Image (cartoon, rainbow, N blue to C red):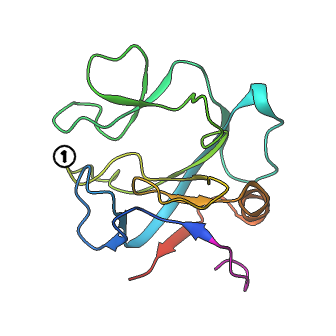
Amino acid sequence: MFGGRWFPCAIGRSGRRALKLEGDGATPMGIYAVRRVFWRPDRGLPPRTRLPLRALRPDDGWCDAPGDRNYNRLVRHPYASSAERLWRDDALYDLVVILGVNDCPRVQGRGSAIFMHLGRPDRAPTAGCIALARRDLTQVLSRLRHRARFAIPG
């Protein structure tokens, strides 16, 4: 729900959990800061938003390797440890919002790469993120302000 309106979305294949663990497929419950927005510049213009905004680069990744010093942080590929590629063949990360999940402080193994991003047309579950239709995500982004917070209720 945002601005008094409900937006259909997909969440993790394991539902929501208060205690998030790496690889459990759950969307973590809680209240999280909205950190910044990435967009895929070869597939469209930047979204209208007041949030910090950066174009994705082909070598952008997000470390998901517990124990790595860059766990749950932006990294560059090639990367020695496991890191998700943000520049994808599908459209899911053409718009991706970085949420402040397990980032301050970072706790090893308590979840990484929890984003709000574009969803699949059939609203299939995610690996733990929140996914919305492009129209809905761009509408939300146009109204969010810097220092916004996002709630994932129980």
Q: Say if 4 sits above or below 130 in the image.
A: below
Front position in the image: 99 or 131: 131
Can you say which quadrant of the picture contains the C terminus? Answer: bottom left
Give the farthest residue toward the front.
122
- The residue carrying mark 1 is 108
Prevailing secondary structure class for the magenta stretch in the rendered image: loop
Q: Which amino acid does label 1 sit on?
A: Gln
Question: Percent x, y for residue 65?
Answer: 24, 34
Can you say which quadrant of the picture contains the N terminus? Answer: bottom right
Q: Say if 133 sits above or below 76 in the image.
A: below
Taking the spot 84% from the left edge, 36% from the top edge, the residue there is: 45
For label 1, count other residues whose C-alpha is less than 10 Å away and answer few (under 14), some (14-19) or many (20+): some
Front position in the image: 13 or 52: 13
Residue 123 lies left or right of residue 153; in this view the side is: right
Stretch of the chain drawn in magenta: 1-8
Secondary-structure class at tag 1: loop
